[in-house]
Amino acid sequence: MNFHGGNIYGFQNIVDYSSNINPVGVPDSFKHAIIKHIDEFSKYPEISYEGLKKNVGKYLKVNKENVAVGNGAVEIIYNFFRICSYKKVYIISPTFSEYKRAAELNGIEVEEIFAYNFDTMNFDIDVVLDSVQENSVVVLCNPNNPTGSFLGKEMIIKFINYLNTINSFLFVDETFIEFTGNKKNSLSDLKLDNLFVLRAATKFFGMPGLRLGYAVAESHIIKCIEKITPPWSINSAAVIASEVIFFDKEYIKKTDIWLNEIENMYCLLKEVEGLKVFKSHVNFHMIKILYNNIDCIQLYEGLVSKGFAIRISEGFKGLDKSFFRVAVKDDINNKKFVFTLKEVLKCLKG
Amino acid sequence: MNFHGGNIYGFQNIVDYSSNINPVGVPDSFKHAIIKHIDEFSKYPEISYEGLKKNVGKYLKVNKENVAVGNGAVEIIYNFFRICSYKKVYIISPTFSEYKRAAELNGIEVEEIFAYNFDTMNFDIDVVLDSVQENSVVVLCNPNNPTGSFLGKEMIIKFINYLNTINSFLFVDETFIEFTGNKKNSLSDLKLDNLFVLRAATKFFGMPGLRLGYAVAESHIIKCIEKITPPWSINSAAVIASEVIFFDKEYIKKTDIWLNEIENMYCLLKEVEGLKVFKSHVNFHMIKILYNNIDCIQLYEGLVSKGFAIRISEGFKGLDKSFFRVAVKDDINNKKFVFTLKEVLKCLKG
C-alpha cells in the first residue's frame, strides 16, 4: 500500500496538517501567468525543455546543462534509479518511502541505515560511515522527512569526500531546503562528480499539483536521465510557472516571514502534556506520543473528527505507532490545531 | 535524436502544421474551470486518481476499474512496455516512433512490419498475419500517424480473435479516434483479455500541454501498470480538465462541424501539382512529393521562411525524404497554407 501525506480525498472541510506544503498557497504570480498564457496548453511543451531548465538554472545559479527536470521530484527519483549502475543503495532512515520503492523496482539491493539519533535529534553520521560499503549510492533526505533533522553543508562535504574514496555516490533530496531559511544550505552549487541534488517547486512554492521537480548533477548524469525520460513529461502549467515563481520576490519574502511560525508552533507543541516534540529545521514537526495506551491512528481518528488531518507513521519504516508528523501552517490555524490536539489527547487518555 | 511534430520553439509567428492538434483550441470549459479551481494546485492530487478515472470511465462508458491514467499517452506507452511479459513486439509501420523506443528501453525485441499499402492507402492485414509469431504483442496505431489510414472495427476484432489463438496481444493507440467522427469506431468497449486501448485528451481536446492520457484494459493489467507508476504522475490541471472537457458538448459540437475541413483540405491538396495526397480518415494528411529534385527538408525550409511548419518524414521509419505530413486547421489558414505550399514547390522546382 502506498501511504503518503496529503491524501485527504473523501473528507470534507479538513485542515490538512498531513502534507508539508507552504501555507502561503499558490503564488499570485502563477495565477496571473496561467490566465495570461492559458493557450500554451494547445502546444506541445518544448521537447528539450531548454527554457524551463534555463529558469531553474537561473534560480539555483547553475548552468542549464547541469539541470534535469521531471514530472515532480518523484519522477526524477524513479529515473535516477533506472540509470543507476551501482548495485547497492543505502537509505538513511527513517525517511520518505519512494527511494526504496524506486530502487527495488529497478532491481537494486536496498539497505536502510537507521541512523536517526532520537536524543541528539539528528542523523548520526558515524553509524552511516560504519555501514556503507564500496560502489554504492547513499540516499540522504536533507532536511529529512519526517524527522525534520538537518545536516550542515560542511559535514556533508566531508561525507561526500569519504564516499569518493570508496567509489560511492550521494543522492541528496533537498526538496525542503528553502524552509531552512538560508539559500546557502543547498549543495546544488558544489559541482561534484559523485553528487546528485534533488529539488522541487512542490513544497516551497506551495504547489504539489504542479508536478515540477528538478535536479542538479554532472552533465553526463543529466544526459543519461534525459535519455530514458519519455518526451513531454512536464506539463504546460509547470513550464508557465517556471517563468514567474522562482523570481516572485513578494512570495519568497512572505514565506520567509512565515518561517517564524515553525519555532512558534514548536513552542506551542512542547507545552502539550504527553508528547515529545523533536527539534525541527523545517516546516513540519515529528512528534512522539508518550502515553502507552494511545497510538497515532487513534489520534488521527480523533483529530479528523474535529477537522484536522495529521500524518501517521505508517509508511515510515523505523517509526512505531507512537509517532506522527504535523505540518506548520498560519498562526491562527496552528493555535486551533494545538488546542484541538490537547483536547483529543485528554479525551483519549481517559 | 528525438524527432516529433510541434517542435516550433525558436521560431516566431509560425503557423504550426506539424502537430496534429484540434484547432478549435483550448476548451472554454477548461479555461473557466482552471481559474475557479486554481487553488487545487496547492493540494497533492488524489493518489489513486479515483475521481479522474471516474470521469474518463464516464466519457468512454467503461468501469473505472478498467481505466489507467497517465502523464500523457506517452507515459502509458512506456509503462505498458515495462510490465510487458511478451518477448517480442511487432509494430505495424510506418508509425509513431515512441512504441519502438519504449519497447527497446525495456529490452523487448522489436520487429516493424511495413504493412502500409501505398496503393490501397491502408494497412494490409494479410502482411501482418503472415509475420506475427506466437506470444507477441502487436502495436497498431488506429487511425495511424502519419499515414492517416484507418482499419474498421470488424476487421480488427477478427484480427484480435486470431491473435488470441496464438497467445498474442493487441495494443491499439486510438489517440486520434474521435477525429473519425464516430464514437463507435473505438475498441474501448470490447472488454477483451488480449486488448489494450490507448486514448488521450491531447489531440481531440486540443491540449498536448495538459499531459493527460488514459487507457482501457482488463483490470489486472491496469493494476500492474498502477503498481509501477510513480505517485502523483498526473498534474492538477489535467484533473481539473477531466471534470469538464469530456462533457463539454459545445466544444465537441464545434469540433464535429470543423471535421469537414479534413475533406475540404484534401480536395485543395489534391489539386496541387507534383504531390500525391494519401486518403486520410483524420485531422492530418500524409503527402508524397513527386518531383525527384525536391525533398521534404527543402520544402520544410521553404515553408518555414513563409511562416508555416510541416512535419518532415524523419523519425518515421519506412518513409523516405519525399514524404511529409500536414495538419488540418481552419478554412482560412488551410487555404493560405495550400497557396503557400504551391508557391514554395514552384520556386523549388525551378
Image (cartoon, coloured by chain):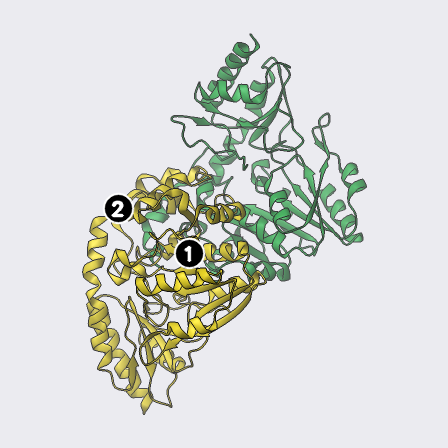
Chain colours: A yellow, B green
Q: Residue at x 72, y 52 (%)?
A: B87
Residue extending furthest front?
Answer: A165
According to the image, label 2 marks what residue?
A: A247
Q: Amino acid at mark 1?
A: Leu
- The chain letter for the residue carrying disc 1 is A
Residue extending furthest top?
Answer: B350
Q: Position of residue B339 (x, y in %)?
A: 50, 15
Q: As displayed, is residue A27 above or below residue B178?
A: below
Q: Position of residue A164 (x, y in %)?
A: 44, 59
Q: Quadrant of residue A257?
A: bottom left
Q: Residue at x 40, y 39 (%)?
A: A50
How far apart are labels 2 and 1 at the CA level?
26 Å
Mark positioned earlier in the residue sequence (2 or 1) = 1
Q: As displayed, is residue B267 above or below residue B167?
A: above
Q: Is residue B320 left or right of residue A300?
A: right
Q: Residue at x 79, y 41 (%)?
A: B131
Q: Is residue A203 left or right of residue B337?
A: left
Mark 2 burial class by Cα count in 10 Å: few <14, some 14-19, many 20+: some
Q: Is residue B252 left or right of residue A61?
A: right
According to the image, label 1 marks what residue?
A: A195
The kind of secondary structure element at disc 1 is strand
The kind of secondary structure element at disc 2 is helix
